[in-house]
Image (cartoon, rainbow, N blue to C red):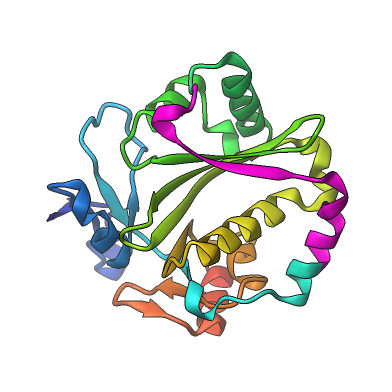
Amino acid sequence: MKIIYSESKIDYSKYSFPYKVYCLPEHKEEYHEIYALGFLPYTGDKTIENPIFYLARSVRININDFKDSSENRRVNDKVTALNISYEIIEKNSFDVLDDSFQNFCTNYAKERFKNGEMGADRFNYILNKEYLTHIIEFKSTDAIIGYVFVSLSKENKFIHYWYSFYNTDYFKYSIGKWMMWKVLKMAQNLSLDYAYLGTCYGESALYKVKDFKGAEFFDGQGWNGDIKVLKSLCKSDA
């Protein structure tokens, strides 16, 4: 892997001259090491063809320390009535060009993502990235409940919960929170070591650690299990 630095916004008043940190993998076998160093896959520039990762304050769950909380059980009790099944499907075996699938995800993004930042072009750019290895499909007897895009390596014992899309008709069931919990249960059943949940900035992102035991965050030096520190950082982000 290669680490590169890109100049970021300067602040002469505080003599702050920061750099953004990126990682260029040289082969897929490095991905688990790159995640472990605090990097996440970058898809912010559709002109970039090669795999690239960025360094950020991110969250992962140490699956060895993960166990259900009372809130997890409460949400699962609500969802049980929907009789949801799931399937972990390799991306290469999934029809990513299916119109109903594409419309489901992009319509959700338009409604729920900040600034609706997931148009068809970017959506298909993400679908084509090699980081995306599997799509988890959730469905009930009558409807598609949602999809989760993941990077999964059973060999290297990690999963990255990357993007999720769900049927907002089921919003009252806290279905987004339930899907994340369900993926953590999958990770547990697969005997994985870590589940990476993406960035954690601002108080609205604290749902990633609030109800999940075993949470750690990357603090710039390593993985830190002091969630009080993380909450303080997120509160000061504004």
Say which residue appears at 68% left-offset and 32% top-offset: 111
Q: Quadrant of the C terminus?
A: bottom right
Q: Position of residue 141 (x, y in %)?
A: 80, 34
Say which residue appears at 70% left-offset and 44% top-offset: 85
Q: Position of residue 137 (x, y in %)?
A: 60, 38
122 w.r.t. 56: above or below: above
| In the displayed structure image, the side of residue 167 where residue 58 appears, left or right | left
Q: In which quarter of the image is the N terminus?
A: bottom left
Q: Where is residue 155 in the image (x, y as percent from the top left)?
A: 31, 58
Q: Give the range drawn in magenta.
A: 74-95
131 w.r.t. 63: above or below: above
Residue 102 or 16: which is nearer the viewer? 102
189 w.r.t. 220: above or below: above
Q: Where is residue 151 in the image (x, y as percent from the top left)?
A: 40, 48
Is residue 70 visible in this depiction of the protein? yes
| In the displayed structure image, the side of residue 93 where residue 98 appears, left or right | right
Is residue 238 visible in this depiction of the protein? no
Say which residue appears at 54% left-offset and 64% top-offset: 189
| In the displayed structure image, the side of residue 115 where residue 224 appears, left or right | left
Q: Quadrant of residue 46?
A: top left
